[in-house]
Image (spheres, rainbow, N blue to C red):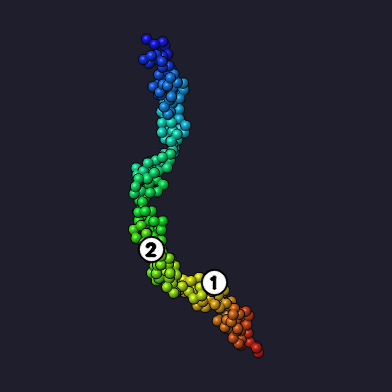
Amino acid sequence: MCKEGFSGNLCELKECKNNCSKNGKCNNGSCECIKGWRGDDCNQRYVIHGEIIDNKVFCWPGWGGIACDEKVCLNNCNSKGKCVQGTCICNKGFDGKYCDKKACDNNCSGQGKCKNGICLCDKGFKGNNCSIRYVVHGILINGMVKCNEGWTGAACDEKTCQKNCLNNGICFEGTCICTKSFRGDQCQYRSCKNECSFNGVCINGKCKCKDGFKEDDCSVRFFVNGNC
């Protein structure tokens, strides 16, 4: 029979106080407590992010586990993934922060956006996973795009404008939309104030008024010999 405090075939093992209260493992006289318990005999219950009321554990929002020290995931990753310290590792076929979205094949090859399992491809790409390159009015040479004359864009499907509107406007479907100060099919002419009030002609940004009209926009009527 071993002396008090020792056990084992040769009485070589030190016993632990209260057998670690059955909340840990005895290692040569020292208790190695399981998570959620501490003390020299593992008899003290504890939590990190929560509280204990009437011996019941209540973890604070966003935390779980025996000691309330494990970050949890919203809706438990919708049962479509595994929660690892607050981050969802989604099962195959699912995506999103909480695995609440269907995944797309090959993540749309990085050339489109995934929406509920369907790839919305960027312009110039097509196919179920946006892996096919294409152009409308042009050719592909070793992966490089060469648009036909008069066309531009990633898919060569946008009409160009003459001289790029001389940088005095924007090109929309082959037509120049000029800024306020310019006009013409290429935005090559300077505009005049109020279009000369339709009482003159615009020449390089200045109004040349018809007889009987004056001011910079030809808006004032005048008479040489009295009033009419």
Q: Amino acid at mark 2?
A: Arg
Q: Is there any visible trace of residue 129 in the rendered image? A: yes
Give residue 10's position: percent from left, percent from top: 38, 14
The answer to whether residue 220 is above or below residue 48 is below
Q: CA distance from mark 2 to mark 1?
A: 30 Å
- Ranked by sequence position, the earlier of labels 2 and 1 is 2
Give residue 126's position: percent from left, percent from top: 36, 62
Look at the numbered disc 2 and give the secondary structure of its residue. Answer: strand
Using the image, tell me which numbered label, if any, was put on residue 133: 2
**Residue 167: which quarter of the image?**
bottom right
Using the image, tell me which numbered label, if any, was put on residue 167: 1
222 left or right, relative to 172:
right
Question: Residue extending furthest right?
Answer: 225
Q: In front here: 65 or 75?
A: 65
Look at the numbered disc 1 and give the secondary structure of its residue. Answer: helix
If the image is split into quadrants, where does the N terminus sit?
Answer: top left
Q: In front here: 78 or 156?
A: 156
Using the image, tell me which numbered label, if any, was put on residue 205: none
Within-10-Å neighbours for mark 1: few <14, some 14–19, many 20+: some
